[in-house]
Amino acid sequence: MVQQVAEKVTDTLKECSTIAKKVYRENMNFRHELEQLLENLQNQLNDKYDSFMIDPYAKNFDFSKMIETMIKKINNQTSSGLGELTEALNQKRKHLNSFTISLFGRTKAGKSTIREALTAGTGETIGKGAQRTTRDIRQYDWNGLRLLDVPGFEAFKGDDDTEKAHEILDQSDMILFLTSDDSVQPGEFDEMSRIQELNKHFIVVMNVKHNLLELETGQPDEREIRRFLKKPEKVFDYERLNEHHKHIRSYVKKHLNIDNVEVIWIHAQSAFLSTREELNEVSDKLWETSMLDKVYDRIIGEINRSGKHRRVLTFYDSTIHFIDTLEKMLWEEQNLIRSQTLFMKEKKVELKNFFNRFIPESNKRIEKQAQKLYAPLQQWVPYFVEEYIGKKDAHSVLEVRIKEKSKQIENSMNDYMKEIISDLQTQLSEFTRQYQYDTEAIQFDQSNIGDFRKGQIGKIIKWSGITVGAISTAVFIGTANIWNPVGLALLGVSGVAGIFSGFMKNYESKKLTNAKSEAKQNLLEHIKTMESKTISGYRSNFNKNIAKKVKSEILDKVEGYIEELFFISDQLKEKAAELDGLKEKLNKHLFAHMLRLEGFTCQPSDLKSIAREQGVATKIVVPLEWNLDSMTRTGLDQICGEHVTLLSDDSDLRGLVAKAIYPAKIKADQVKIIDDGKKMTVQVTVPTSTKGLAIGKQGMNIRLAQKLCNVKIELV
């Protein structure tokens, strides 16, 4: 049966093959251009990271690992996206000579029955749909016509299965979506919406269920067949089926955002039975009553009228969809990274303020701790003077005492310094924890999946292959080995002990009372000097390792991290803009093809400007000499599945803006240009009654107008 279709469109299918080969080469050139763009991005990010890591201390700074992970994620996304586009083009290359029609639908909708009828099969696969998986995609080819039978949605067990169905959809030029009158479910169309993102031509075929087989034997029921053929209107109950039609249109509008959908009613079982030899006498009547001829006629009409258009769209819309996904992904990453960068700048100020508080506070703590440790020694001096001055063992007692206290002070001061460092680590860890929490909050707040279609979200997750992990608790710098003040207290005390020894020899020749008084005073002064030297030594070591090394290293690395983030953000912004430019080139080539197929003499360069939201609407500025206006219809709306508006070029920006806001009817004198020397803005005075048309659904019309005219438009 399908052979008959192929025979009636043979010449058109040959033309479809010719144009498919041409647009394949064009898309491969665009793929190469995309590859160069993404390679440049990866090289720039990798080079910047390498320069960042030249600093030998950079590896001690855990933000370097975050940057490395971030760059790996971006590289994975772009490489995987390019690889998937390449594979999609390779799959299409295998079937350049075929116009592909795919059957989609839920299990038990009659899909196998229809396929058996279309292919004159034996019927052995009927009723086995529930046993199939997405690996069981059946393919049939006849002289340039290719039919793909995709398992029912129940076979889609996860993302991999859905992705497989998406790959089949990507190769398809036309979709037949099968449903049945016994159970039309909104979920069928919701499932379809997950993969219907490539702007494919879409026909709903409703299988009217009426059994013509004997329940016990499964053989044709001749009596029921005669009844069916005599009064088919009882099966094709118009009033009942029309209600189904309304529901389907409602579901399609809700889930697929398609305003009008064609629905063809058929009886698949009678079409299949018409191929059975034992029913040869009523074969023609069964086939005619099945209404499957309407599907055939629709396929034949579609191929003859728009087959070449469909082949062009299959290549270009697929490539555009991939690039659009990559562009949105880069913008999303850019927004997240820039938000983190600005947040990090705020945190750097907090960090600097923290050090400005912590360092003087720590110096005061060092002073108080030293004073506390030297106090017992100072309190012991009066006792020592009274008890030992003038005695032979005074020197040895003093030396033993001083050495003993010196060691105690050294140990205590070192332990205290470790306590200060521990406090620093705790503060930095808390700072890091807060930074991590706030960064995750930024990622959650900034993530805007509203700009992504369902399939695009899945692609981005798949392409990433890696996510940014948690920040470590030592994110700024490891502080475990920054303190090593061995011997500071001991050296100071031992030196003073020698001085005290000299004083004792001098005082032995004086009167005892004066000697005691002067010895007490000088001992206390020199212990105070020793205390000051200890404080100075510990402060000096602390300030050298903390104030200069840790503080400066952390703040310098944070500044370097901020600079790196800004660089990555700027590169993503730049490359996203380049992807948008590449997408514009693709759209110009696409619509140049479409217009040529509609009889226009057109090259991509003739299209002055183009703004498109794939599958929704397109606005194109065409040469003035074409003498077109926004009311001109080309037939592209139905072919492309979106509103296509052609606008004549205008040397006056005000006139162009007025045209671009169509379907709102605006005159040039309602448009005012405001240019302050830095940026240009256009203000359009729009009546309240017209403002909704000017803005469009979800702001689509005003977005397209702004992109088309490359200027910000404000409605007043």
Image (spheres, rainbow, N blue to C red):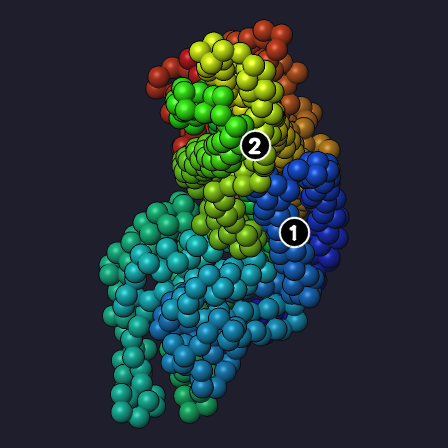
- Which residue is pictured at 58% across the width and 74% down the height? 140
Question: Badge 1, how many Cα within 10 Å: few under 14, some, many 20+?
Answer: some
Q: Camera-side residue: 195 or 142? A: 195
Foreground residue, 451 or 462?
462
Q: Mark 2: few, some, or many residues within 10 Å (few <14, many ≥20)?
A: many
* Residue at the (58%, 64%) spot, across then down: 100
Q: Residue 665 or 304: which is nearer the viewer? A: 665
State the image quarter where residue 230 is shown: bottom left
Residue 163, image x, y percentages = 51, 61
From where the camera sits, is residue 239 visible?
yes
Q: Is residue 181 left or right of residue 384?
A: left
Whether 12 is drawn above or below 426: the answer is below
Picture quarter containing residue 225?
bottom left
Q: Is residue 376 above or below residue 592?
A: above
Comparing labels 1 and 2, the label whose residue is closer to the camera: 2
Instruction: Give coordinates of residue 39: x percent, y percent.
Output: 72, 45
Amino acid type at circle 1 is Ser
Between 214 and 324, the one nearer to me in the picture: 324
Where does the image place residue 16, in percent across and percent down from the top left?
67, 58
Q: Is residue 223 left or right of residue 656?
A: left
Q: Residue at x 45, y 25 (%)?
A: 388
Q: Secondary structure at mark 2?
A: helix
* View extreme (top): residue: 676
In the rendered structure, find residue 234 and report the number of the disc placed on it: none
Left or right: 301 as drawn, with respect to 627: left
Mark 1–mark 2 Cα distance, whole angstroms, equals 62 Å
Q: Earlier in the sequence, mark 1 or mark 2?
A: 1
Quadrant (top left/top right/bottom left/bottom right) for the C terminus: top left
SS at badge 1: helix
Q: Which residue is mark 2?
A: 490
Q: Which mark is residue 79?
A: 1
Q: What is the three-letter code of the residue carrying label 2? A: Leu
